[in-house]
Image (cartoon, rainbow, N blue to C red):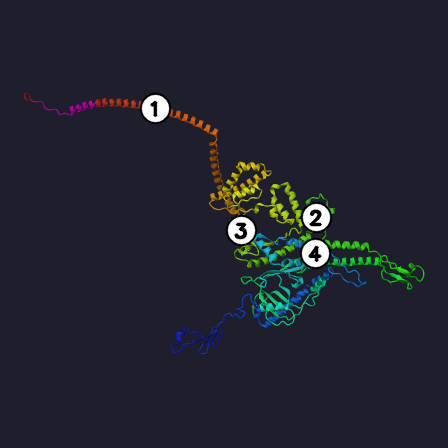
Amino acid sequence: MAIDKSVYAAPLGLDSLGADVPALDIEIVNPERVMLDDGSVEITLAPGPDANSLEGAPFDANLAEYLDDDVLVGLSSDLMGEVDADIQGRKEWADTFVKGLEVLGFKYEMRTDPWEDACGVYSTILAEAAIRFQAETMSETFPAAGPVKTKILGEVTREKEEAAERVKADMNYELTDVMTEYRPEHERMLYALGLAGSAFKKVYYDPTLGRQVAIYLPAEDVIVPYGASHLETAERVTHVMRKTENEMAKLQAAGFYRDVELGEPTPYHTDIEEKKAEEGGFSITQDNRFALYEVHANLVIDGVDDEDELAKPYVVTIEKGTGLVLAVRRNWNPDDPLELKRQHFVHYVYVPGFGFYGLGLIHIIGGYAKAGTSIIRQLVDAGTLSNLPGGLKSRGLRVKGDDTPIAPGEFRDVDVPSGSIRDNILPLPYKEPSQTLLALLNQITEEGRRLGAISDMNISDMSANAPVGTTLALLERTLKPMAAVQARVHYAMKQEFKLLRKIIAEYAPTEYTYVPDRGEPRARQDDYAMVEVIPVSDPNSSTMAQRVVQYQAVLQMAQGAPQIYDLPLLHRQMIEVMGIKNADKLVPMTEDSKPADPVSENMAALVGKPMKAFIYQDHDAHMATHQALMQDPMIMATIGQNPMAQQIMGALQAHMAEHLAFAYRKQMEDKLGVPLPAPDQEMPEEMEIQLSRLLADAGRQVTQAHQQEAAQQQAQQQAQDPAFQLQQQEVQIKAQEVQRKAKKDQTDAALAAEKLKLEKTKVQINAVAEGEKLDAAQRQHKRKTDIDAAKTMLSMNKPQQPPKPPGRR
């Protein structure tokens, strides 16, 4: 905001200034500026993002289109200087590589020293080691079925297992059929890895192909600072690319690179490339392509980042001949708060070296190859001299045909001036090829083969009766260096598959769709989220022979205790290790079974196919159907004639036991009132203890219910037995007799009681009557006594009257 003059707010607001102050008219000149009509104040609002400015550019835009030329020139100068320093830092490694290519032996050297057509062969130890490594590693990492297998993340469920199969099939299809260049690129990478010690893969989405790609990059085309330990932590990674004029024009027209004038291409080739071309019989002088530096580095770019900000990952593309910056792009995910670098490269290492680049066979056994080449040439030249010796002859001796070698069966005329021919010819004392040199050559070759991990085991020195463990120990000792290299290749391939998986999953459908040209549904994005993609190679064993011996040792141990081994799984893995196809059909397993109805399971049992119970099935119905089969007399008679009858019945009973176990689990869940965790799910200790206590109570309840059911079933079974029924009838008759006697006794006792009661009643009545008589006599006596007493009282209380006068009446 720009303010031309100072403006102070009125203490009481604009209304306090009075009515005579004219109102300010505000005119909006444009969406970005507001002006006052008196011209005293101009306020410029912050402009919004412009599509043509850096702020309005998309996240994945080419920032070079928005930056000033001065910024681009400085950026190009700084990066190219750092890249040149990185090239100088690996110079010793590159020089050794170039010298090793000279003795690779893929061409015959026409020598003129010490004479014309002297021996020009090379020792094959270096080429043999590289070819063997490529062949062994290719067979391990890229079988016919595809190089990818899956690993389930978290709890293993049927849904995840099905998703893992879809992802495995989808990725193997992508790598073997869609990405047609992947296998040749992988073979080239393995061969270069063995020789150079380092090789790279670049994984990215190619919009021109509409799919992901993983191209091989030679070590000389990937420039990394010497002190870097890993691609993830490297401060700078530079990919040297070469593109034709037509390719550059297409990329510029598509907007991927800046549309600037590049002039004529300036070819650029390293010493390693020139030596490789020479060894392959090619010439690179006619290579008319542009050389580009694609620099992946952490930078602070003027005009994009603040000076006090931390460096962020960018990808800067520079044309080497002119130094022009063609593209600058952000190299992190827009939704990543940490702004971590997006990785596009995978580093394959043969043997880790002192710096970033690995050591290859050229660095390890290149000296042996050079010494062997020298000795071989000496031996061949010595044989040539001994078979076609030269010498001295007298001046006067003349041989027809001059001194050309005499062919077999040819005789020539000789003019001898004097004496015999022997006196006129003195052959030089050339010796036969030295046996000491031959022994030294064999020793050097053997040392080089051993150091290059390509020495063969001498089977004749091993006893035919040697234990498998001894053989395994010898194999492990011989193959351990190569096993370590294979483990590093396995790790790098895992990183490569992670990058490919991320791209494939990003462009995979969200729902299942049917693709006609594939013939099978493609995996969806949710499937990729549930599994991890890993190589099929085994980092613990580098060769098929080593794995076969390992499985033989396990099979020997399984013979001693077969009950503790999963023999079908062991045999299937053995077949797969031997490279035999369709191992799942040769040795079917229970895990391969699909949910089936009980009749189909009975049919599978009769023909010896595996069966499997699933937790959600109606186990009571399945067991009832299987029991019906086992109780069918016609079927049991037929099975009894089968030599595999015992195995059939054993498999059927084992399958019924699976259903019984799931049914018992369901009964326990019913008693608890809640579903139990998955059978293989891990639980915290406290939860497991609490659940165990609850299950103990539920188990007692289930057991009591089963005991009651068993008692009822036993009673029902006994009730159907005729002898038991007779016994029951006799018991019932005896019980009835006892009841009758008891009833009679009860009746007699009741009668006796009634009689006794009647007698007691009579006695009570008599007693009452006697009592009443006694009471009446007593009452009468008392009454009489009371009357007499009353009379006596009355007589005593009566007043005496005076005697009547005589004579008065």
Q: Which residue carries the number 1 mark?
A: 751
Q: Amino acid at mark 3?
A: Glu
Residue 223 falls in image quadrant: bottom right
The disc labelled 4 sits on which kind of residue?
A: Ile
Helix, strand or loop under label 3: helix
Residue located at (61% from left, 44% from top): 567
Which residue position is annotated with label 2? 474
Residue 362 lies in the magenta-colored region: no
Q: Which residue is more in the foreground, 605 or 21?
A: 605
User: How many other residues sit within 10 Å of disc 4, few (<14), some (14-19) or many (≥20)?
Assistant: some
Spot occupied by residue 342 in the image (x, y as percentages of width and height): 58, 61
**Mark in the foreground, 2 or 1:** 2
Crowd tier of the residue under label 3, counting other residues whose Cα lies within 10 Å: few below 14, some 14–19, many 20 or above: few
Tell me the residue that label 3 is attached to: 159
Percent from the top left, x then y, of residue 430?
85, 58
Start-end of magenta stretch = 782-804
Q: Amino acid at mark 2?
A: Leu
Quarter of the image for residue 177 reads: bottom right
Q: Residue visible at 62% across and 65% down? A: 295
Determine which of the numbered discs, if any, sits on residue 23 in the image. Answer: none
Q: Is residue 794 magenta?
A: yes
Kindly indicate whether the residue at mark 3 contacts the one at mark 4 (C-beta within 8 angstroms).
Answer: no
The reply to whether dot 4 and dot 2 touch (C-beta < 8 Å) is: no
Majority secondary structure in the magenta region: helix
Sequence-wise, which precedes: disc 4 or disc 2?
A: 4
- The span from disc 2 to disc 3 (Cα, nearest Å) is 44 Å
Task: Give the image quarter of residue 214.
Answer: bottom right
Q: Position of residue 149 (x, y in %)?
A: 60, 53
